[in-house]
Image (cartoon, rainbow, N blue to C red):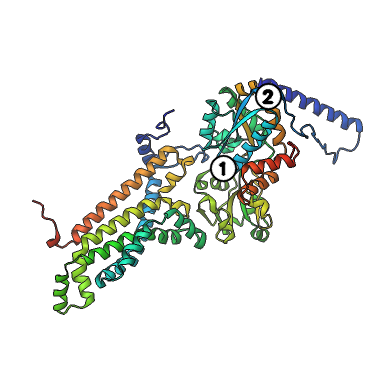
Amino acid sequence: MSALLPLASFGGAIEFIFTPQSSNVTGGAKVGGLEQAIELTLKQLEVTVLALALALVIALPLGLYLGHKGKGEFLAIGLANGGRAIPELAVIALVAALIGVGLVTVTPALAILGIPPILTNAFVGVRQVDRAAVDAARGMGMSEMGIIRKVELPLAIPTVMGGIRGATIAIVATATIAPLAGVVTLGDFIINASIYGDDGRLAGAILVALLALSLEGLLALLQRRLTSDGLKVKTA
Amino acid sequence: MRTDQTRLRVLLAAIAALALTLAVAACGSSDDSTTSGSTEGGAAGAIQSNPDNGKVSLTIGSKNFPEQEILGEIYAQALTAAGYKVKSALNLGSETVAQKAVKTGQISGYPEYASTALTSFFGLEPEEVPADATEAWEKANEEFEKEGLEAFEPTPFASANAVGTTKETADKYELETVSDLEGVSEELSLYGSPECRQRIDCLAGLEKLYGLKFKSFTPVDIGLRYTVLEKGQADLSILFTTDPQLSAESDKFVILEDDKKVFPAGNVIFVTTQKVAEEAGPDYEKTILQVQEGLDLKVVQELDARVELEKETPKQAATAYLESAGYIGS
């Protein structure tokens, strides 16, 4: 008995995304299809954007500030790395048990995933900025806030954006488990094989991958826009 | 061979019915409140070991969650007591795996839920699954026979989804059956597993067949089904009829009777092959039917509680059941 046999076909999954399919257990109601695929994709996007925003609000200022001050390396690197080891499923289960389910639970639980890469990269990015540039800015009478905003942040953009991109991928991929805590995302296709079958499972995986790639592409574009011309690698 | 047995059973039932009619007629008494207490005492008593069975090796399987493992252990230990050489494989991942293992002869047989067999293996819609356990079993057996398989008669208990709530909520809204939710369900939130949302034997059925609308349905991990009730997040939660919490904390949680039979009959039938049944001789089926006779809902909830709440092994729980029922000596 080949282990490959139960795998759904790619064609079946694509069909599932566009056309509603019949299911054994829904009492005749069709499942899948473009409408449901779009609905779930939007939900996945919504959760991702909310969680990313929360992670940014917490981690970005903190990372920039610590990097500027040159303090808290232990917090920025150590704690953040430790944070990456937290199993997300456990976080969601814990938060769900403690404060309930729904967007309110899932958003902070996913934000926890985004904080480490954003914090670490912001810290490292600012630390790497040429001290001579910072000293020159200070010598010209720039305020400390001005230095962070006008000198350090622009010079650290490639590294900072790298952290944000990593956080986004982690969050959008993990938002797949949100149906276990009351938010019906694309994970619904993947978790409920008894309803959607193997075609639905593969379709869910394909859609999550496409969404992740699109977000990655968008952020790459944004990064190009934000990076000052002087920092860009000249091609040819 | 199965059809012969069925025919024989029908004949016996007809004779019994006739005898009863005659008896009632003979008495000539008023026909109200004549309950025929049919106490079948045939299965009581210890399992007799038969030396002939020593030549037969059996492998009893089960799926890999507590209730199934306990059942597997009960059957395995009972068959050992009957003199068979028994091995067990109580870790089969799903019904698909288990059925394949039976067909290929890796295991001799395993306990399966009649409703699961009908929906998963034979593509029936849950609403087509007979609510009556015997009917469901006969229907499943018809299909099994075509594949060289055979299922023994169902257990007394049925494992099924159920709408559960706290005693407090049930008292407040005077809920006993699912139909009692009519008119109040709009104020109540329902929690269930993610797959419940679209399944006809779950939320879809409650909406379509009972015509109920809930304030909200929230999908959660199946492991949280009691937590959400305890924390007051959910007014109603989809539980299982065999959940140990229902016996251990019967003062806290109640399930509502499925008066319109949306949740199909999940009585357990032991699935084996006709070949094994023939080779193993009559004691095989006899022993299995004998030990499952005591398995009503209460007993199974208690057995589940031993394993899931009190952390006994399925083996210990099974032994305790067989000893206390007098099937094997302690």
- Assess whether mark 1 and mark 2 are in contact (beta carbons under 8 angstroms): no
- Residue A74, placed above or below residue A165: below
Q: Position of residue A212 (x, y in %)?
A: 31, 50
Mark 1, residue position? B65
Of residues A78 and A96, the one drawn nearer to the viewer in this rendering: A78
Location of residue A55 by image quarter:
bottom left
- Chain bearing tag 2 is B
Is B279 on the left-hand or right-hand side of B96?
A: right
x then y, percent, for residue A228: 15, 63
Answer yes or no: is residue A52 visible: no
Q: Residue at point 18% right, 77% down?
A: A142
The amino acid type found where label 1 is placed reads Phe
Which mark is first along the chain, 1 or 2? 2
Foreground residue, A148 or B137? A148
State the residue in front, B310 or B168.
B310
- What amino acid does circle 2 point to? Asn
Q: CA distance from mark 2 to mark 1?
A: 29 Å
Residue B53 disc label = 2
Residue drawn at the location 17% of the way across and 72% of the way down: A134
Do we see residue B119 in this rendering?
A: yes
Which mark, by number, is residue B36?
none
Q: On the picture, is B307 further left or further right than A153? A: right
In the rendered image of this protein, does residue A119 appear above or below residue B178?
below
- Looking at the rendered structure, the secondary structure element under dot 1 is loop
x, y percent for residue B227: 56, 57
Q: Is A65 in front, or is A45?
A: A65
